Image (cartoon, rainbow, N blue to C red):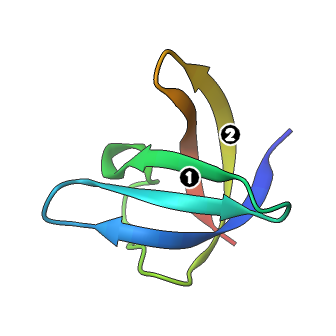
């Protein structure tokens, strides 16, 4: 099941950011996990898959909705 959220922070030059889901939880993401051809900015509404890593919750398969 894909989650929905909003880009909270993005550091394009460093290649990462955070998405806040509809319940207020934050997910780290790497820009490599954004669907090709899509550009994210702060406030963009996205859908994504959440995975647990040894560093915490991360977002993958990110796309704009």
Extreme bottom residue here? 43
Structural crowding at the residue carrying mark 1, measured as other residues with C-alpha within 10 Å and reported as few (<14), some (14–19) or many (≥20) = many
At mark 1, the secondary structure is strand
User: How far separated are the C-alphas under marks 2 and 1?
Assistant: 7 Å
Which numbered circle lies on residue 62? 1
At 79% from the left and 45% from the top, the residue drawn is 2
| Image location of residue 38, percent across then percent down | 42, 69
Camera-side residue: 44 or 24? 24
Q: Which numbered disc flags the more N-terminal residue, 2 or 1? A: 2
| Image location of residue 39, percent across then percent down | 38, 73
Could one spot residue 23 in this view of the protein? yes
Q: Which image quadrant: the C terminus?
A: bottom right
In the picture shown, does residue 41 fall above or below 3?
A: below
The residue labelled by disc 2 is 49
Quadrant in the rendering for residue 24 = bottom right
At 54% from the left and 71% from the top, the residue drawn is 7
In the picture shown, does residue 52 fall above or below 25?
A: above
């Amino acid at each position: 099941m894909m989650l929905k959220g909003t880009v909270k922070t993005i550091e394009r030059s460093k290649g990462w950011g955070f998405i806040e889901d509809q319940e207020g939880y934050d997910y780290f993401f790497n820009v490599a996990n954004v669907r090709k051809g899509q550009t994210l900015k702060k406030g963009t509404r996205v859908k994504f898959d959440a995975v647990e890593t040894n560093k915490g919750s991360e977002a993958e398969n990110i796309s704009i909705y």
